[in-house]
Amino acid sequence: MSLARHIIFLGAPGVGKGTQAQRLSQYLRLPHVSTGDMLRASVQSGSELGRRAAAVMDSGALVSDDIVMDIVAERLTLQDALAGVIFDGFPRTVHQANALDQLLQHGGSQIAAVLHIVLDDEEIVERLSGRRVCPVCGAIYHVRYHPPRVSGVCDQCGAALLQREDDQPEVIRKRLAVYQAETAPLVAYYHDRPAYHRIDGDGAADEVFARIVEAVREKG
Ligand code: AMP
């Protein structure tokens, strides 16, 4: 059995991690594992975990490391994760990165690439405030840069698009502050590893994706 080779997307909220992770997932045929999507699904399901996570998420703060590690550890046991997954929005703290290293070491798996997408703060706020998401299939749009064919309707599945609660301006500011405090230290954590790649997040999604493919190919 070959070992799992996982890919991590790193970067502030709004740099395009979700969009690029979805594309890379199709390109490499590896599952897209977004802890944000999984947490939103538990909130929707009304589970006990979802109830605990909902208020924290709406405020822009981070859900506890224990909850997140439980969700991730369980996800990695599924059959489709055996060759590797594309993580999106995880790890988010140094504690989670350490816990992931330990988890992978036990399983003999490794991190094949850390893709750190970099973008100016102003551009980030612009992207997040215009973002619209499909609550059914997870497709991501932008009112100006990537509008759906029919305003407010998902191209892929026809569902009504939503603005995420945490994409409101005050919550965006809070999420960026949380990123600086809790997640930005992960750049130093991964920076010296051969798997680390800094990716310029400016420009059209196609251009950014081409940079990502080049970085992933380099890793072999
Ligand atoms: P995202 O969709 O990645 O922007 O995540 C939305 C929200 O879910 C975040 O603002 C956090 O409240 C929570 N969340 C997602 N991933 C994590 C994680 N790895 N650690 C802690 N909280 C997370």
Image: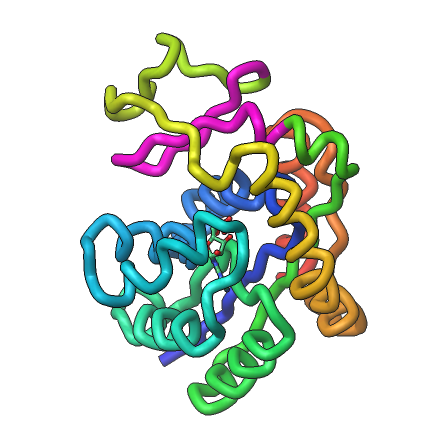
Left or right relative to 50: residue 139: right
Above or below for 89 versus 165: below
| Residue placed furthest toward the top | 150
Residue at image coords 58%, 64%: 92
Q: Of residues 210 and 130, which is closer to you in this image?
A: 130
Along the line of sight, which residue is nearer the eye, 73 or 106? 73
Q: How many marks?
A: 0
In the rendered structure, the answer to whether residue 8 lies left or right of residue 180 reads left
Q: What stretch is highlighted in magenta?
A: 127-144
Q: Does the magenta stretch include residue 135?
A: yes
Q: Which colour scheme is used?
A: rainbow
Q: Residue at x 74, y 68 (%)?
A: 185
- Residue at 34% x, 56% y: name it: 38
Side (left or right) of 95 relative to 156: right
Q: Where is residue 15 in the image (x, y as percent from the top left)?
A: 64, 41
Q: In which quarter of the image is residue 84?
A: bottom left
Looking at this rendering, what residue extends furthest in the bottom direction?
106
Q: Which residue is drawn at 36% across and 15% down?
A: 152
Where 178 sits versus 209, above or below?
Answer: below
User: Quick check: 201 above or below 151?
Assistant: below
Residue 50 percent location from the top left of the image: 28, 60
| The N terminus sits in image quarter | bottom left
> As displayed, is residue 109 above or below residue 119?
below
* Quadrant containing the C terminus in the rendered view: bottom right
Q: What x and y, as percent, mark residue 193?
A: 74, 73
Taking the magenta stretch, the answer to whether it contains residue 112 is no
